[in-house]
Image (tube, rainbow, N blue to C red):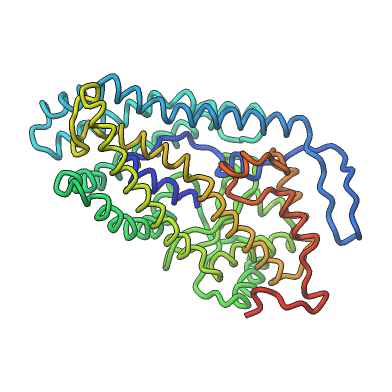
Amino acid sequence: MKLFLLFLMLVCAGVSTIRAAGPALEEQTNFRSFSKSTNMVQDASQVALPEASEKTLSFYRSGNVLWGVRTAWSLLLPALILFTGFSARLRSWAEQRGHKWYFAFALYFIAFTLLSFLLNLPLNFYSGFARLHSYDLSNQIFSKWFSDVFKQLAISLISGLATLWIPVLLIRKSPQRWWLYTGLLAVPFLILTMLIYPVSIDPLFNKFQPLQDKAIESKILALAGRSGIEGGRVYEVNKSVDTKTLNAYVNGFGSSKRIVLWDNTLRTLDEDELLFVMAHEMGHYVLGHIVKGIMFNAVMIFSALYAVHRLSGRLIARFKDRFGFSNLSDMAALPLIILLGQLLTFIGSPIQMAFIRHQEHEADRFGLELTHNNHAAATAFLKLQQHNLSNPRPGEIYILWRSSHPPIGERIDFCNRYRPWETNVPVRYDE
């Protein structure tokens, strides 16, 4: 799901933010050490939720501070480049050397991306490497982190040079309707990205291979057959070289769709817990979450592009002397688009997070209805607690702006109580 947010920033901001390589779920499902639980359970089939340890709470609090710093910096950096007139000077430099429009744009984009990369590098190093090692959540050596960071930089440069000239050109050709045309192009580009990312981009960072345990693979395939899934693939990836945390996810579209298990997860969860995790991921396919996600994000993209169109005109009219340009079609307006894109992403995050949390909750429900193994589902979440660090009952601001999954505490509570088949109540996804 994080790919949707990156794509929204790619379209609205004109360039994706360069971030350091690190665990895919740095804050959402990170749990590790807990004190002795004081919770009472109704019967042996239910699972108690231990209370968070001080180390867990420390990681949670520092993560909130880091998020605040990142959010502020993501707005401050493009604002500084914009209001100091540096972007206009950089555009003049690129035009003097590029001569033709595309080459001037390419020079500007490369210089701007490299500058942003360097200015973001200290914060990325702390958040993606130093902080995770300080909490004993990472196995990644510095050379791997450094290599992954520059791979991400190369991908951003190549993808930007290949595609970002299109919305810039649309702004030049159609100043009033560029947002509509860009939004129409964004949807097929989003689908194309989902098709190629699992097979072309992900393997650049880690080794993917078919599931090696054939016994568990046969049970997963049988579970998929019961779900009505055909042609799906299950892969394992050697994420243990990067992280000590656990994860599994679904990505891809059409022929590239796949369920991915981290090798850490395979070694930590028992068979019943793995089957629930697989049932959860299958739920995303069966319930059409990928297609629904595309439709939802298409609406978000159109809304964001239109907002950028309306807001940018007013800001340029007021600050054109400081900006050094008088229309959005000027390539020097890129930091303005980034600034507005970051601001709109922040404003829209609660909506985005709520939509994804709903899908994750329904995938939990699907997994329980498919396996009827509530205890294994709950203990799988507990093992996430034991191997990661996070707050199982985070605050409302965290949930609204940062949590793409329901809090682990809520998920365990749901596993403990959702048993309609025991009382002959119809299940939601019986068909």
**In this image, 319 relative to 297: left or right?**
left
**In this image, 124 relative to 100: left or right?**
right
In the figure, 68 relative to 269: above or below? above
In the figure, 223 relative to 74: above or below? below
In the figure, 229 relative to 329: above or below? below
24 or 148, which lies in front?
24
**In this image, 408 relative to 331: left or right?**
right
Image quadrant of residue 76? Answer: top left
Q: Residue furthest left?
A: 99
233 or 210, which lies in front?
233
In the figure, 8 relative to 375: above or below? above
Q: Name the residue at 10% across, 26% down.
A: 96
Residue 300 image position (x, y, % from top left):
41, 52
Q: Quadrant of the C terminus?
A: bottom right
Q: Name the residue at 19% across, 35% down.
A: 327
Residue 67 image position (x, y, % from top left):
55, 32
Residue 154 image position (x, y, % from top left):
34, 38
75 or 289, which lies in front?
75
How many marks on residues?
Answer: 0
Residue 350 image position (x, y, % from top left):
54, 46
